[in-house]
């Protein structure tokens, strides 16, 4: 059993302590136990354990409630444990994704006895694997009242800047069909791979939108992510499939994004294989405005997809704010600069005053 | 052990008898035994067994020698044995590819004691599997004098028409490269699948040559036969590969065909994975002219690749002449019309008369 977590201690040491409890997806019991035990010691908090998710909240009767969320699991350890602090940077599996953010949340829970808004802390499991296992999704289905609030802050890495909303993502298979023939008599067939040429031409001619919402700049994208086709080395192929991923700004609904792709690839068989809504930045809400003011910076658009979108789908403004560079997530070299851990903490402390 | 083959009997019955000795590639011992035994009974023939190939020849001191070649193996049986004769059509595995042709050869061997040209009969194994196992190739390496002659007739199905020469075939992999990036920030990468668009455009714009040689019309072709690429559903792919099969008229050497593709796909990484020369029709040779005259028809170009090209590479004119529709080869429904078996026999008998 790990040493008890000292939530009130230095948040960088707390990050390292969390990193040193391995918690690859589906193996989060130990870290959830440690988090649960530490949170139960904080008397003003109501704590609930739900599978390997740990939920905690204040019940101070404030007019607004802020939900802070972070997952406890990591991708598989890659010879990068235990945590190592080198020149102000903490290295190790889970440092940036996202135990730095978890540490900020835990430290706040222990050191903010009278926050300006009621707070809900959601630590959850299985974010790094197929969406169907996602602990936040399970909490949403089984304890929905625990996710209610006026603003959600997902503490995924954002370089300690507020990233607002997120883009949606849709993946489609664009299928071209033809007719087989022996290549010695190729003109008797219809080549399905050749027919993909027109699809690639449309991709090439495509001008992705740049969209400004609440001062955030979203940049859409349309990329082929897979292609396959072929029967044998001497056969004109009768089927070829191009898989395309479209990232769309949150002013488009999933249905609109799907319709857009169906129009773009008219004449081809289009199958949606994956579709997740974006999230509007929601920066007009008074509580969000307070957070932006506390951060002292200008929010930027979140381009990737995160669990922010789950909160947005519940009708709440939701933002990302966490320490570290998200592009280091899932790499062997992942790390988090300690000054960003402290910076996130300060912003949230100012916000919650 | 099968009943002895009666080579002098009706060639259609002989075809059926050969079909009823299953001889899937690498399992040709039984049919080779039967063919060898029957040929050894023909006194004017010199017979050699070489693995599961059986070679037989006359040594009559004629000024010219004609080589007749047929493979004994078939593709796997597909619930299509034994042979069935229905309305003048013999059905079953190997009927068209190519025991009808083998039967014509065997019947000739037994019933043409004084042919106008010396004859060499080559029955060989493993034609239907990877070229490296091909029995004709083995004979060429180990008993090369057995393939020498002034004309080769490969009795593969040709609808009983003389198909002259054959087209060459070259397969290349055209590789596009790029740089990976997360699709949420696709503009930071270079999409290798998108880069294949230009390759497909060149394929589409390609005008295959039509080439006339010795009155035979060759029609070239250029077909994508495979495509693959993709890293993950959210990653801009850094590699994509298109496999292209080019069928080229026999006025082009393999080196010229390869150079042609390298020029066509300039700017891309091109790897040759397979290259087989074509064969010129060689219809100007006097012995070939005799065969054409005996057939009473006009030769047509062979578009597919056959072992004809092996003989052409030895510097001999070589043609295809055999009963049945080649497009039925390798199908469950394969069959050979009995009148085409008889027709081939008559043409060759007139020729050798």
Image (cartoon, coloured by chain):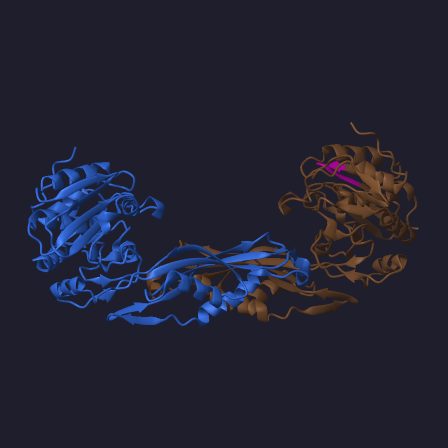
Chain colours: A blue, B brown
Q: Is residue B124 visible?
A: yes
Q: Nearer the viewer, residue A310 or B191?
A: A310
Q: Residue at x 65, y 64 (%)?
A: B221
The residue range painted magenta reads B49-55
Seen in the picture, residue B188 relative to A235 is either above or below; the reply is below
Please name the predominant secondary structure of the magenta segment in the image: strand
Q: Nearer the viewer, residue B48 or A158?
A: A158
Left or right: B306 as drawn, with respect to B119: left
Residue B259 horizontal/vertical position (percent):
57, 65
Left or right: A185 as drawn, with respect to B180: right
Residue A353 horizontal/vertical position (percent):
7, 58
Q: Residue at x 84, y 31 (%)?
A: B4
Task: Examine the structure image and report whether residue B52 is included in the region drawn in magenta.
Answer: yes
Q: Give residue A260's quadrant in the image.
A: bottom left
Left or right: A235 as drawn, with respect to A215: right
Q: Give residue B262's quadrant in the image.
A: bottom right
Residue A39 horizontal/vertical position (percent):
13, 42
């Amino acid at each position: 059993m790990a040493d008890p977590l000292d939530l009130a201690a230095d948040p960088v040491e707390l990050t390292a302590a969390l990193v040193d409890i391995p918690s690859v997806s589906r193996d989060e019991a130990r870290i959830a136990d440690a988090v649960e035990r530490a949170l139960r010691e904080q008397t003003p908090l109501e704590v609930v354990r739900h599978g390997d998710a740990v939920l905690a909240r204040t019940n101070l009767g404030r007019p607004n409630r802020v939900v802070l969320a972070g997952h406890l699991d990591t991708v598989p350890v890659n010879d990068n444990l235990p945590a190592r602090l080198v020149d102000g940077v903490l290295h190790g599996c889970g440092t940036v994704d996202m135990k730095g953010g978890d540490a900020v949340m835990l430290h706040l829970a222990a050191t903010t006895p009278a926050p300006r808004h009621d707070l809900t802390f959601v630590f959850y499991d299985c974010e790094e694997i197929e969406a169907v296992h996602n602990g936040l999704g399970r909490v949403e289905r089984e304890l929905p009242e625990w996710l209610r609030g006026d603003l959600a802050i997902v503490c995924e890495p954002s370089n300690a800047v507020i990233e607002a909303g997120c883009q949606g993502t849709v993946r489609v298979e664009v299928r071209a069909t033809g007719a087989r023939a022996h290549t010695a008599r190729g003109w008797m067939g219809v080549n399905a791979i050749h027919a993909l040429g027109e699809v690639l031409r449309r991709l090439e001619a495509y001008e992705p939108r740049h969209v400004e919402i609440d001062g955030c700049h979203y940049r859409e994208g349309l990329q082929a992510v897979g292609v396959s086709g072929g029967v044998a080395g001497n056969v004109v192929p009768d089927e070829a499939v191009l898989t395309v991923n479209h990232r769309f700004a949150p002013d488009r609904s999933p249905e609109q994004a799907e319709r857009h792709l169906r129009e773009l690839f008219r004449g081809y068989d289009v199958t949606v294989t994956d579709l997740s809504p974006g999230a509007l930045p929601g920066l007009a809400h008074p509580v969000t405005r307070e957070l932006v003011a506390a951060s002292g910076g200008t929010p930027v658009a979140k381009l990737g997809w995160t669990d922010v979108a789950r909160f947005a789908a519940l009708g709440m403004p939701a933002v990302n704010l966490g320490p570290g560079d998200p592009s280091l997530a899932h790499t062997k070299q992942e790390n988090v600069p300690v000054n960003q851990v402290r910076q996130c903490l300060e912003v949230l402390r100012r916000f919650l005053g």
